[in-house]
């Protein structure tokens, strides 16, 4: 699917790719879903590895497809994909190791400009038979993310984003809650807007999903990539505390955010909060219902 090589063992992959043996495997922390490791090879090179015993290799093929799209846009740092596969029922993904460095003094401005560059890049090649979506379905966390192409962003956001998450979350809602959710879906045409142009999105851009590379720049990791309205990425950056104001100033200068964004932001984040409700449980219900009540 991605043109990225599939392997049947981690050590075999590393032997084939680098002609080296595994010297050390150190666990890394910070992710929500998978086990993460720094592998040191004979000769000293480091490789990043993510694995998951409950997933199949297609789970990581989907992440690799997102990273490949981001890399192809040529706008912002993202780790190179080395390979993916299954080893005795354990799915794995091998990536270039991002050596962390200190943030450059213009870290946030550059990050804002680079993300704007990614959002402005031609996104046609990442989706076929429609303007919005992606070449294949992928995952947001461990929830399936449907990317069936559509020509309307609003239709895409309703049918492929909010509606499937509402359906999955039905057990958390009362009957009046479900009614309101349906009303919100019916009203979406009047609440959202179509973008000037479709944008390649990271899809899950919160502070845990970028790192500072040794170049002092932002490197984005762990995407749930698709082609959509750029505002959805910006909204996600604001969901858990927000990025530095210099990031937004630089972004806005390079790719002005349309008027009324503040009124649409929570609708985009409703998708992310519903996904958190579905993955982590009831503590997210009040945030979800606050947004549903605001719009329906
Ligand atoms: P998950 O899929 O479980 O959310 P992440 O992709 O967020 O996992 O990775 C977990 C942690 O591993 C990150 O918080 C980061 O610290 C580290 N990490 C992720 N990708 C790389 C990489 N390419 N190089 C070095 N460290 C990485």
Image (cartoon, rainbow, N blue to C red):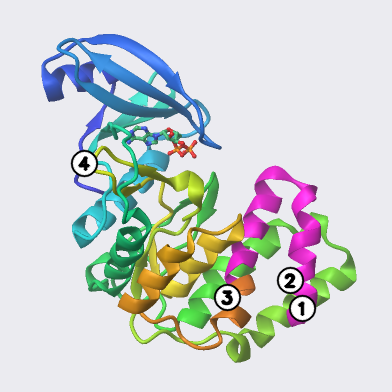
Residue beneath label 1, please?
A: 294
In front: mark 3 or mark 2? 2
Instruction: Spot the residue most to the left.
Output: 19
Answer whether labels 4 and 2 touch (C-beta < 8 Å).
Answer: no
Q: Is residue 111 above or below residue 175?
A: above
Numbered label tally: 4
- How many residues crowd around disc 4 within 10 Å: few (fewer than 14), some, or many (20 or more)? some
Q: Disc 4, disc 1: CB below 8 Å?
A: no
Is 154 on the left-hand or right-hand side of 219? right
Residue 279 among magenta residues: yes
Name the secondary structure under disc 1: helix
Say if disc 1 is inside 8 Å of ligand 1: no
Region of the chain picked out in magenta, as a range = 268-296
Does the CB distance between marks 2 and 1 fall below 8 Å? yes
3 and 4 marks in contact (CB < 8 Å): no
Residue 67 in percent (x, y) is at: 30, 49
- Measured Cα–Cα span from mark 1 to mark 3: 17 Å
Checking the image for residue 176, the label placed there is: none
Q: Earlier in the sequence, mark 4 or mark 2?
A: 4
Where disc 2 sits, the SS reads helix
Q: Alpha carbon of mark 3 to alpha carbon of mark 2: how far?
A: 15 Å
């Amino acid at each position: 699917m991605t043109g990225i090589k599939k392997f049947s063992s981690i050590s075999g992959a590393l032997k084939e790719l680098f002609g080296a043996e595994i010297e050390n495997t150190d666990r890394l922390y910070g992710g929500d879903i998978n086990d993460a490791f720094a592998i040191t090879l004979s000769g000293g090179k480091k490789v990043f590895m993510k694995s998951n015993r409950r997933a199949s290799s297609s789970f990581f093929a989907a992440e690799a497809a997102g990273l490949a799209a981001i890399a192809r846009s040529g706008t912002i740092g993202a780790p190179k994909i080395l390979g993916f596969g299954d080893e005795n029922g354990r799915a794995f993904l091998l990536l270039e190791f991002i050596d962390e460095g200190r943030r450059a003094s213009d870290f946030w401005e550059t990050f804002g400009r680079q993300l704007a560059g990614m959002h402005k890049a031609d996104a046609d090649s990442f989706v076929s038979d429609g303007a919005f979506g992606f070449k294949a379905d992928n995952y947001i966390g461990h929830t399936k993310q449907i990317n069936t192409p559509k020509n309307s962003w609003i239709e895409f956001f309703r049918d492929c984003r909010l509606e499937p998450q509402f359906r999955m979350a039905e057990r958390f809602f009362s009957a009046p809650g479900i009614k309101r959710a349906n009303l919100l879906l019916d009203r979406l045409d009047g609440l959202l807007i179509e973008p000037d142009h479709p944008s390649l999105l990271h899809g899950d851009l919160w502070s845990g999903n970028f790192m500072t590379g040794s170049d002092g720049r932002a490197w984005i990791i762990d995407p749930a990539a698709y082609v959509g309205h750029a505002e959805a990425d910006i909204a996600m950056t604001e969901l858990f505390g927000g990025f530095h104001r210099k990031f937004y100033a630089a972004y806005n200068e390079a790719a002005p955010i349309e008027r009324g964004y503040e009124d649409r932001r929570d609708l985009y984040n409703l998708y992310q909060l519903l996904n958190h409700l579905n993955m982590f449980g009831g503590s997210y219900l009040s945030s979800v219902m606050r947004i549903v009540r605001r719009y329906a």
